[in-house]
Amino acid sequence: MKQWKASQGIANYDVNKKATRQEMRSFVCGQCHVEYYFKGPEKTLTYPWSKGIKADEILAYYRENPHVDWKHAKAKSPMLKAQHPEFEFWNQGIHAKAGVSCTDCHMPYQRIGAMKVTNHHVQSPLLNLNKACQTCHHTSEAELKERVLTIQSRHQEMHNKAMNALMKLIDQLEKANKDQVIAADKIVKAQNYHREAQFLIDFIEAENSSGFHAPQEAGRILVEAMDLIRKAQLELQ
């Protein structure tokens, strides 16, 4: 959190002193629902946030810290594996900007006798629209559900097109590695584009809201991935 806040120009941020209670209701989820990796031979748990928490800002961090999670069996590219970056992705959406925490939607308040308590049955808000959504959105459950499903279905369409393009690139890289007709330096450039494009698509794939947490950001990242795939394919022509 200190690194991330420093990237925003806030020096010496202390989460235990400066975070509000509402922020803490999301930070507790963000301890696990994030992108991270195990750095160096010591396998130090590291959050790659020093340049920011958007997907491409995290990718910029990895350009300067060339961690490799695995080598692609077909493309031979040095790969990154996104974890489950709900916290980073949610931060780009309208709910985060409005001060709505993770728990407000996924663990909404409920009444038990005279007490108002957090429901610890963590689940999709779609399964509890009345308490999770209608506290703020004064419209019918049917309309709210339709809004969510429309966002997710359009997101899935974009995601599938990006994934299909990625699969085509992997086939092209596999062929280039076998044929050895294209110059080695061009193949390396294409592999680096592949590494970055697949990380961005995986970032969206591994985030579990199917685009809902930040629909426009999801579209932006998928277009960025498609552009990287296009650049890789140009190298392989």
Image (cartoon, rainbow, N blue to C red):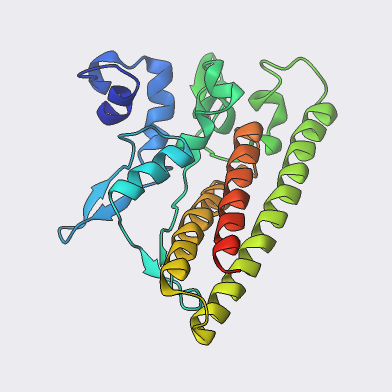
Residue 175 appearing in the image: yes
Given residues 213 and 108, the one toward you in this image is: 213
In the current view of this chain or complex, which residue is farthest to the bottom? 179
Instruction: Compare residues 70 and 211 and report the one nearer the observer.
Output: 70
Where is residue 216? Give x, y as percent: 65, 32
Residue 162 higher or lower than 217, as above or below: below
Q: Is residue 109 visible?
A: no
Q: Quadrant of residue 111?
A: top right
- Percent position (x, y) of residue 118? 50, 26
Image-based side of 139 in relation to 1, left or right: right
Examine the rendered structure and indicate whether residue 188 appears above or below residue 48: below
* Left or right: 189, with 48 as reference point: right
Q: Residue furthest left?
A: 42
Image quarter of residue 80: bottom left
Residue 12 image-quadrant placement: top left
Nearest to the observer: residue 191 or residue 17: 191
Q: Residue at x 56, y 69 (%)?
A: 236
Report the residue at 70% width, 37% height from top: 126
Q: Quadrant of the C terminus?
A: bottom right
At which x and y percent is residue 117?
A: 49, 22
Tell me if residue 55 comes above or below residue 228 in the rendering: above
Place of residue 55 in the rendered image (x, y in percent of width and height, measured from the top left): 47, 41
Between residues 110 and 147, which one lies in front from this camera angle?
A: 147
Look at 41% across and 20% down and name the residue there: 23
| Total number of numbered discs in the rendering | 0
Image check: 11 left or right of 151?
left
- The quadrant the N terminus occupies is top left
The residue sitting at 71% across, 56% down in the picture is 160
